[in-house]
Image (tube, rainbow, N blue to C red):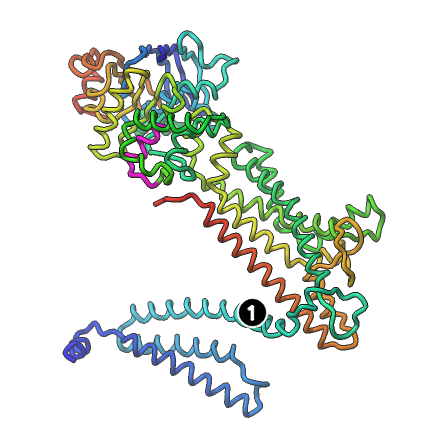
Amino acid sequence: MSTEVERVTTSKRTLEPKVLWLTAAASFLVSLGVFVVLSMAGITSGFDIVATVLWSAFLYVALSYVMSRIVEGKRKATDRLVAGVVTSAFVIALLPLISLIYTTVADGLNRLDGTFFSSSMRNIVGEGGGGLHALIGTLEVTLAASIISIPIGIMTAIYLVEYGRGKLAQAVTFLIDVMTGIPSIVAGLFAFALFAIFFGPGIRFGIGGAVALSLLMIPVVVRSTEEMLKLVPNELREASYALGVPKWLTVVKVVLPTAIAGIITGVMIAISRIIGETAPLLIIAGLSTNMNYDLFNDRMTTLPVFVYTQYANPGRDAQAYLDRAWTGALVLILIVMALNIIARILAKVLAPKGQR
Amino acid sequence: MSKRIEVKDLNVYYGKFKAVEDVSLTIEPRTVTAFIGPSGCGKSTFLRTLNRMHEVIPGARVEGEVMIDGKNLYDADVDPVMVRRQVGMVFQRPNPFPTMSIADNVLAGVKLNNAKISKSDAEHLVEKSLKGANLWKEVKDRLNLPGSGLSGGQQQRLCIARAIAVSPEVILMDEPCSALDPISTLAIEDLIEELKAKYTIVIVTHNMQQASRVSDKTAFFNIAGTGEPGKLIEFDDTTTIFENPHVQATEDYISGRFG
Ligand SMILES: Nc1ncnc2c1ncn2[C@@H]1O[C@H](COP(=O)(O)OP(=O)(O)OP(=O)(O)O)[C@@H](O)[C@H]1O
Ligand SMILES: [Mg+2]
């Protein structure tokens, strides 16, 4: 108890963490109460959890500022205000993410069953059916896009960091910057126009989609690889040259292995970026309800396009279509998550060891 | 094995900036030569011209001749990569390859060049080089652990082992002890003494005592002012340089009156 007294009597009084927690809990309870009453009175349609969290964050920041201003003085209060705002910003940023994952999982689980992974939409106008054709399409188109983009992207980055000097390198960097900003629909139109020259108008096939996606993927791969290569200390390159190792072997055996973990992470981010693309694929890969394993023939549907069509053009039983759309979205999220986990494991395994 | 280096009228540039002007000197085989001089006078720059490491910097170039056993390193038909296999280098900051184990670091010169080497030969080379660098006893039980897990002094000796594993004829060392404690420094100085039996050694140092302890010959470089090129002021036996130098500037520098 003596410490309590001391704190109160000295001029440097502080707010106890306990008090702050109580304030936070009170803010939450108050806004919870308000929104429950509002929803019961029928003013809002249903209970609004997002608004509740937002308002409790706002209340807490305001309350803790006022309390701190009274007890602790101006400097401390400002500190609490800024800390509160930053934390709330973080929570607000997290909210949509949690809400999105929650909704997708909740709605997607309905149709996450064997049929979904074993059948296409061929001859389906109501219940049943699945997204196997779209899953195969996504895997094939993404794989093809990666096979095109990763070598080109990494080699371009190597050129820019290790070899590029002067005007040409500047021009390449500029073009990469421009490419980063291409809207995805333009990439789709470009691929369509390109293949229409060779195969006539109305051409639709998976590989065209892969080419369109590569246009979006290459700049991302180049940029991230470039950053990683720049992080490799020059001393390592010099150590290698000083052993009489030619430049290209230095790049292949010293620079790339040192940067590989970061490069893989960058590549995975690039894949995640394109795997969810819809617009360009609608144009050049087309829509299909059938299984199609052949990238080079016929229309090919991918998961995002599948989700879009299920949602946009429902058949007899609209709910069945919505369920399939959610499951398609869930599967897409799961694939991206799996890719990220694999990337992390690879990066851990391949990262240079024993650095302090 | 080791070779004589003759430098004739060498000018060294970074783009338009002339960093070192008109250096001529001869380095005898199986000797230790120390380069001393104030910071920025071009010691590192000059050292790096002796194995054509200077030219890896964009815009860097050299005028003049560096003869190793009568052959000019800067002749058009000379491959800089081959020069660097003959003239090894140890850097100021230890720089083992972080992706490689201790053993692989020693073998880096072989493995990075895609050369084939049998397992027993490789083990033999690792042991010989690490022994040559006075590091064998400390690391023989952890050859497969990462080289970057060693202490700074051990890392520097690992870099020396890596340099001697490719059996060069000349070893260049740019302030090899500046990041090390006195004990590691002594270990490296002892090592230089031993290496002298087989290799021609050139060492840059800011430590006068070190120069006087390890070297047979000393070259004093100086610079007239910022933006001016560095020049070779005096080159002679280490005892002469430290006991009765012929040039006033050398005496001033050694007795600590400037620089
Ligand atoms: N990469 C470079 N590009 C341009 N100029 C450089 C470069 N490296 C060094 N210089 C310049 O060349 C001159 C000589 O530098 P150098 O590094 O050879 O000096 P030093 O004698 O080794 O100095 P220190 O004792 O500090 O290591 C300096 O004026 C320096 O600014
Ligand atoms: Mg230097």
Q: Position of residue A229 (x, y in %)?
A: 49, 40
Q: Which of A247 and A186 is in front in this view?
A: A247
Magenta stretch, overall SS? helix
Query: Circle 1 marks a residue in which chain?
Result: A
Quadrant location, ligand no. 1: top left
- The magenta span reads B149-162
Does residue B40 appear in this view?
no
Quadrant containing the N terminus of chain B is: top left
Amino acid type, label 1: Ile
**B217 falls in the magenta region:** no
Which residue occupies 78% across, 61% down? A290
Q: Residues within 10 Å of mark 1 (few under 14, many from 20)?
A: some
Which residue occupies 71% across, 64% down? A118
Q: Which residue lies furthest to the right in this view?
A: A200
Can you say whether A75 is above or below A144 in the image? below
Residue receiving disc 1: A101
Can you say whether B123 is above or below A207 in the image? above
Can you say whether A107 is above or below B33 in the image? below
Q: Nearer the viewer, residue A164 or A114?
A: A114
> Is the CB of the residue bearing disc 1 within 8 angstroms of ligand 1?
no
Is residue A238 toward the left or the right of residue A123 in the image?
Answer: left
How many circles with numbers are drawn on the protein? 1
Which residue occupies 24% across, 14% down? B216
Which residue occupies 25% across, 34% down? B180
Q: Where is residue B240 in the image (x, y as percent from the top left)?
A: 19, 12
Does residue A40 appear in this view?
yes
Q: Residue furthest top?
A: B70
Can you say whether B49 is above or below B106 in the image? above
